[in-house]
Image (cartoon, helix red, strand yellow):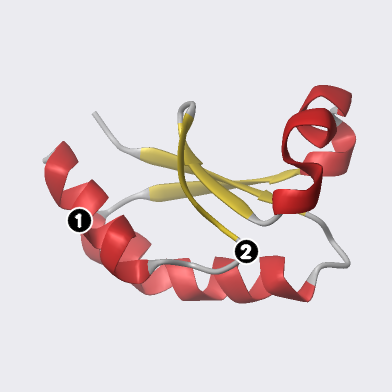
């Protein structure tokens, strides 16, 4: 089964764009799909993650926020294999 991560993002957020670009090489390496969701489109997401965006999730598990923690993501993905 393919792994899907979720990036909670905002269209005007430079940190969000930077995290999305930083994730791409690891997503390619591990054949991971990254779904980018606009946090502002869902009031519940805004309530929970507003000040933490960008946030990288796997299901309900928060992997990192603000900046990509590449070593942590790599370790997490290796643990899923």
- The front one of 30 and 74 is 74
Asked if residue 31 lies left or right of residue 11, the reply is left
State the residue position of label 2. Answer: 66
Residue bearing the label numbered 1: 75
**In the figure, residue 53 lies in which quadrant?**
bottom right
Residue in the image at 44% along x and 69% along y: 24
Tag 2: Cα neighbours inside 10 Å, few (<14), some, or many (≥20)? some
Q: Is residue 39 left or right of residue 76?
A: right
Mark 1: which secondary structure? helix
Give how far across and how far down residue 36 sits, in percent.
Answer: 64, 49
* Picture coordinates of residue 58, whole percent (x, y): 43, 36
Residue 29, percent from left and from top: 24, 65
Mark 1: give few (<14), some (14-19) or many (20+) Cα within 10 Å. few
Q: Secondary structure at mark 2?
A: loop
Where the N terminus falls, by quadrant?
top left
The image shows residue 55, relative to residue 11, as above or below, that is above
Nearer to us in this view, 41 or 69: 69
Residue beneath the point at 49% across and 49% down: 34
Task: Name which of mark 1 and mark 2 comes first in the sequence.
Answer: 2
Quadrant of res 41: top right
Residue at 30% across, 59% down: 72
Estimate the spatial distance between the alpha carbons at disc 1 and disc 2, rounded to whole Å: 18 Å
Between 38 and 54, the one lying in front of the other is 54
């Amino acid at each position: 089964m393919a792994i899907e991560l979720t990036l909670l993002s905002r269209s005007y957020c430079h940190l969000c764009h930077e995290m999305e670009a930083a994730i791409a090489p690891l997503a390619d390496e591990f054949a991971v799909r990254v779904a980018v969701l606009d946090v502002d489109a869902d009031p519940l997401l805004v309530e929970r993650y507003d000040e933490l965006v960008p946030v990288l999730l796997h299901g309900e598990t928060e992997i990192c926020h603000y900046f990509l923690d590449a070593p942590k993501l790599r370790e997490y993905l290796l643990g899923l294999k």
